[in-house]
Every structure is written in structure tokens, then in C-alpha cells.
Amino acid sequence: MSETIKRNHKKIKEAVLTKDLTKSYQGRTVLKGLNLSVKAGTVFGLLGANGAGKSTTIECILGTKQADGGTALVLGRDAKKERRTVFQKVGVQFQEGDYQPEIRVSELCGETACLYERPADWRKLCERFGIGDKIKNTVKSLSGGERQRLFIVLALIPNPELVFLDELTTGLDARARRTVWKILEDLKGEGLTIFLTSHFMDEVEALCDEICILRKGEAVFYGTVEQAKAQSGCERLEDAYLKFADEEVVA
Amino acid sequence: MRTFFSLLKTELKLNIRNMNMVIFAVIMPVVVLVILGFIYRTKPALPGAEYTFLEQSMSAVCTISICAGGLMGLPLVVAGYRERKILKRFRVTPVSPVMLLGVEFTIYVLYAAVSMALVFLMAAVFWGVRIPGSPAAFLGSWLLTLVSTLSIGMMVGGIAKNEKMASVIACLLYFPMLIFSGATLPFEVMPKMMQKIVALFPLTQGIQLMKAAFLGIHMESVRVPAAVMGIVTILCAGAAVKFFKWE
């Protein structure tokens, strides 16, 4: 906890806080009064089937989408109103990250780093994520897994207090996934707050302190992994998840 | 400032790597100059005129790169970045829209400056072109033309819904202006009726202003074209920033 306080000078307890967040597209409700509270220095997992509202939640929190109702605070601030202050300390990896057609890894990292007051050493981050030998390559020449790791690197370049990782290990092989988990564990130890979405329950179990399962824009479970198992009466998180997310009928 | 120059460096490198602007903003004006140079050499513009035809055409040749950058390059880059969600990535960083637009704007200013320097150097060396009028006034009117044209492009890039839309608008602006405002086809060789029509293009005004400054011809209404371009700049640049869309 002392680490967290050192990192967060303002001692904000909740890195992310939403109240009654609602959003609908063309009459279809995507989020129904979502209340989330992510404590600083923890890893939070937002789970749910495709279309359950995970990405919409992240976008409403970040202010890239306007919520119809409710409030969302990031590090105690409204990300839409105080965009430039908030994003000095918040890193984001979107699900569909894109980049300039001919850009090289070093250029993309350098261009990202120059936007921040105190950026991390992106070369070291690339090394750490196993793409240190690729920095001269063009981004489009990377494999899917390498590109995914690069986008995690980009999210960490700000030296953030809080990072959003949307489907962080999609496309990674087993070893790369373990490496990413280990690094995220280490960063959490240094006080980083992580807000992630994932479809891999082993990953969620390994990383997350708390999870929220969304079904059609509604929180159907909110608590720890252990609580999820206990409440559902399942031994494995995946079974518990499916029970909550109501996917077993479909699957 | 550190952010500005780092972004400028990377974006400029990407832009050059893309080659489009190198061709349309740097090589094309040189080609036009060489063609005009071979045709007219050091012939006077009119029998008894104190300046050559080539000197009379210098302003027009200088606007080819302005046209290419402002009406093609800039709107397409901004719209393309929006469509590819690159702007969305920038949105979740501390960078401001003014910074991003400023960087792209500067790139096309550089292209236009490089192109002008090259064209002048070649024209001076091969065909003895000099500036009979005022270099300072010429530079001023060049800047005004450049900035107003780039502002139009910035607004198109800012407002167009997607790259395709931007491309259509860019073509509608670029080709008529490039061909008929006197940038490639000399204004002087057009029929009188046509001259009257194309005088409505803002770029035509810019070229006439540059030409008068370059040749040292007295122009009765310097204020009108200058005011037109100034107003276009303020309105378009203002709109580009005010209505800037990340997505």
C-alpha cells in the first residue's frame, strides 16, 4: 500500500470510479447503470461475452464515447473535461489499435514517448516484452503477437499510474502470455493499477484482484475470483463465468 | 516545443517515405519549370516587356506545391489518420489537436519552401531568372497564399467524414485550382472570358498578388486579394480547430 501512496501523490483510493453509467446506441441499451470502483494498485478485470459492453465501458470511462447518464472518474478526474491532465498518467491499449502505414517500431515508440512529461525508456520496455530486436522493423511487418506486445508497450510508455488493456493477450502464444503476466505482476508491485478485459479465464485468475462480469450491459457479478466460484458453486472460474454470463446455453 | 519537433521529425519522415508529396510538391513544379524554360527560354513576356515570360510564370510555378500540399496532402493525411483510428490513439494521450494540426501544417510549409528554393535556383542558373520587383513583398504574398491554401486543406481534413469524402473534396478543389488558377496553365494565355471566371478562385488572387510583387508591377487593389486570403485563413483554420473530430 505504501508503494501505491508513493506513486499516487494525491492518495486517490479509487483509480476508476463509475456511478450509474448508462449508454445506448439507437435505442439499444448497451450499459445499464454500471457502478465500478477500482482501487489504486489493484488489477481489475472486466469480463463478458462479445457485445456485452466491455469496450463501451472503457470508452465511456476514457471519454472517447459520451455516456448518456452517470459519471466516470479516472484518477479522481473527468477524463473528457481534463483530458490532457488525465492522460499524462493513464496508458491505454485499445482493442483495434492502428498506426501510420509505413511507421517503424522505434518511430511509433518515439512519437508516443514525446507526448509525455516523464516517459518511460521505451527501448527497455521493448526489451522486456521481447521485441527489443524488432525496433528497426516496420510495425506492419511484425507478427500479430509482436504487435500486440508493442501496443502494451505503448500503453506503458507514459509511466502511467493506471493502464487500460483491452483484450491484452489476444493473439499471444502461451509463453508470451506468461511473460506478459509476469511483467504486469511486477508493475502492479510497483503500484500500477491495471484495468483489463480478457476472454481467457486462466489469465483473469492469475492477475485480477477483482472482477466484474457484464451481461448485456449489466453487472451480473462483482467481486473476487474466489467469490465468483463460491457464489456459482463451480470449481473452475471458466464454469463460474459461463454461469454468470449465461453463455452455456449458447456454447 | 520538444513534443512539436519530435512529432514533426517522425511525421515528416513518414510523409517523405510515402513519396506522394515528393512527386507532386517537389518534382512536379520542377518539371513544369523545365518545360516552360525550354519553350520560352529568356523571351520577354510581351514584346518590349522588361521581364521574361519565365519570370512572369515563377509565381504560378511556386503555387503548384502549395496546391498539392494544401488541397491534396494535408486533407488526406488528417482524414486518413481519423479513419484509421490513429487520431483515436492520440486522443487518449495528452497531445492537443492544435499540436497535431500544427505539425502536419508545418510539413507542407516545408515542402512548399523546398520546392520554391529549388525552382528559383534552377531558374536562376539555367534561364537567368531574377526578381525585378520586391523579394520581401513576394515572400509575404507567397506566405499568405500558402497559409490560406493550407487552411482550406486543414478544414477539409477536419470536417470530411472519411478519407474517401476528403479525397473527393480534395479533387474538386485541387484539379480546377491547379489547372485554371494559373498554376500550370499561365493566366495570360487564357481567353479573356475564362480569366474572368477563374479570377474567382482564391488561388488565382494569390498568384496575381505574388506575380505583381515579383515583377514589381503596381497593383491597384492589393488589399482585396490580401483581405480575401486573410479571411479565408482565419475562417478555415478556426473551423478546423473548432470542429476538430478525433473520430
Image (cartoon, coloured by chain):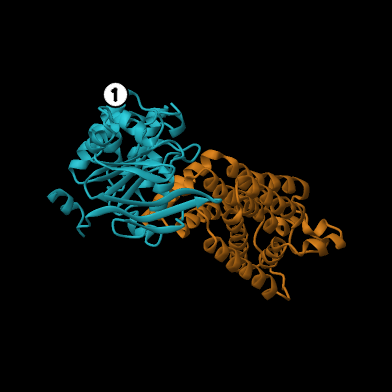
Residue B186, above or below A217: below
Q: Nearer the viewer, residue A157 or B115?
A: A157
Q: Chain of mark 1?
A: A
Q: How many marks?
A: 1
Q: On the picture, is A110 further left or further right than A99? A: left
Dividing the picture into quarters, in which one does residue B56 lie? bottom right
Q: Secondary structure at mark 1?
A: helix
Place of residue A82 in the rendered image (x, y in percent of width and height, measured from the top left) = 37, 61
Regarding residue B136, the answer to whether it shows in the image is: no
Residue type highlighted by circle 1:
Arg
Q: Nearer the viewer, residue A137 or B243?
A: B243
Is residue A124 or residue B143 the one in the foreground?
Answer: A124
Quadrant in which the N terminus of chain B appears: bottom left
Q: Judge left or right: residue B90 versus residue B128.
A: left
Q: Is residue B188 visible?
A: yes
Describe residue B230's horizontal placement relative to residue A97 as left or right: right
Q: Is residue A165 above or below residue A203?
A: below
What residue is shown at x 38% (from left), y 56% (from top)? A20
Residue A96 drawn above or below residue B75: above
Q: Position of residue B213 (x, y in %)?
A: 66, 67
- Please give the name of the residue rendered at 60% of the width and 67% of the height, measured from the top-left corner: B235
Which chain can be seen in orange? Answer: B
Looking at the image, residue B178 sits to the left or right of residue B5; the answer is right
Q: Image quarter for residue B220? A: bottom right
Relative image position of residue B224 (x, y in whole percent): 69, 74
Q: In the figure, what tint was chain A given?
A: cyan
In the picture as drawn, the residue positioned furthest to the left comes out as: A2
Neighbourhood count class around disc 1 (C-alpha, 10 Å): few under 14, some 14–19, many 20 upward = few
Name the residue beneath numbered marker 1: A175
